[in-house]
Amino acid sequence: MPGLVVNRVAPGFLGDVLSSFPEGLVVVSGSSGKSTTTKMLVAVLERHGKRIFTNPSTANISQGLTSALLERASLSGRIDADLAVLEMDEGHGALLSGRFRARLVLLTNVMTDQIDRFHDAEKVRAMLGRIAARATDAVVVNGDDGLLAELRPTAEVVRFGVSDAVLAGSPRGLGYASTTPERLVDGTRVTAVAGRAARITVGGRELEVRLPAKGVHYAVDAAGALAAAERLLGAAFDPAAAVAALDAMPPVFGRGEIVTVRGQQVEFVLVQNTASLQLNVDELDEGLDQVMVAMGSDVRDPSYLWPADTARIGRARIVSGSKADELALQLLYQGVEVDRIEPDLGRALDDFLALPAPERGIKTIVFTADSMRRTRSHLGLTG
């Protein structure tokens, strides 16, 4: 609400403050991975002694960005930080692009995402192109994304990606709307991934990195953050400090986050589009004893997620959220046992947590963004 009001009464505030940081502005955008990549980049820069302003609550649309600025700005409208690193929604970032200049833009990927907003992947590429055009020093781009490869910004392009071996080990692919036919042969590359462990080559040196959650997609986020940090820091980039920062970084809001709730560990797995659902379900441990799945109002058309194969879930103890019936239908068609459908998310959470301790693994909740926010609120995890 504060951001909404300020954007109405002082429409120049956002662009003015974003232009005030001594070492410039970094914008992170793309279909998926924005929040994790932003947090990784901030962690690495802070480990190098930089004072960073960011939007840690993942508020990435115009009013959320303005609210984040208001929390830190002085009465003169300035923020005591060296550099701003901000996650921006693709659509809002494109709309705001005429109001800021960025030292560096980092683009994660283009996926079939939010079809009620963006309709097709080419539209997303065009919006990201408008954001990339605002970069003055460099555009750090996922080199495996075929649509991003077509962008021609005026700033220098720095690419990151995965090796042939990593792609071959991901039989369902990387989830992008289009994947380039060839892998990068130099630069920042993911060369191996096993669970939460990854090897990433940066500047010719192979780094052993612990990821905040399991999966190749998190390793790619780390590669993007490391490529951007190396570009921003130049000769001051310290690989050991970068690895230490990533190793210590917790997951971002539900993205493989393991929390203790009512005396028991629960893993939260956020899915936001078809590719995200597939990549994250593929990383679930086989034979999990207790899984709950929830879909909320953020998914306008549940059939959008049907191309994902959810069979690995095996058994869902409870299916919940405002779209519980549609979600249960998908799971049942794909061979998943569904014990119970409970549209009331609060009741479902209480009953799921009241189940006896699982025989295998830990309790796991797979949810879309709306159900994630409601879950955090119901469980008192909003801080």
Image (tube, rainbow, N blue to C red):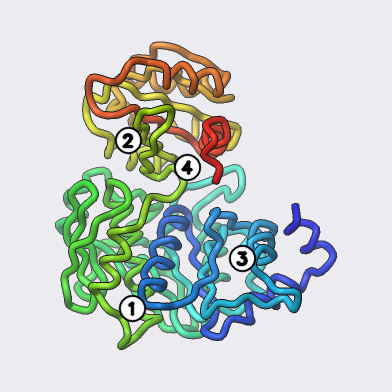
Q: Residues within 10 Å of mark 2 (few under 14, many from 20)?
A: many
Using the numbered discs, state the Cα–Cα distance from disc 3 to disc 1 in whole angstroms: 26 Å
Q: Residue at x 36, y 69 (%)?
A: 44
Residue 367, horizontal then vertical, whole percent: 46, 33
Q: Amino acid at mark 4?
A: Gln
Label whose residue precedes the other's in the sequence (1 or 2): 1
Q: Is residue 134 visible in this depiction of the protein?
A: no
Label whose residue precedes the other's in the sequence (4 or 3): 3
Which residue is tagged 1? 230
The furthest residue to the right: 9
Which residue is tagged 4? 272
SS label for mark 1: helix
The furthest residue to the front: 263
| Circle 3 or circle 2, nearest the eye | 2
124 and 59: which one is in front?
Answer: 59
Q: Amino acid at mark 3?
A: Ala
Label whose residue precedes the other's in the sequence (3 or 1): 3
Which residue is tagged 3? 94
Residue 356, horizontal then vertical, whole percent: 33, 15
Label whose residue precedes the other's in the sequence (3 or 2): 3
Taking the image as shown, residue 57 lies to the left or right of residue 65, namely left
SS label for mark 2: helix
Task: Classify 78 as above or below 169.
Answer: below
Label whose residue precedes the other's in the sequence (4 or 1): 1
Q: Amino acid at mark 2?
A: Val
Q: Residue at x 43, y 61 (%)?
A: 39
Using the numbered discs, state the Cα–Cα distance from disc 3 to disc 2 in whole angstroms: 31 Å
Q: Residue at x 47, y 85 (%)?
A: 137
Which residue is tagged 2? 281
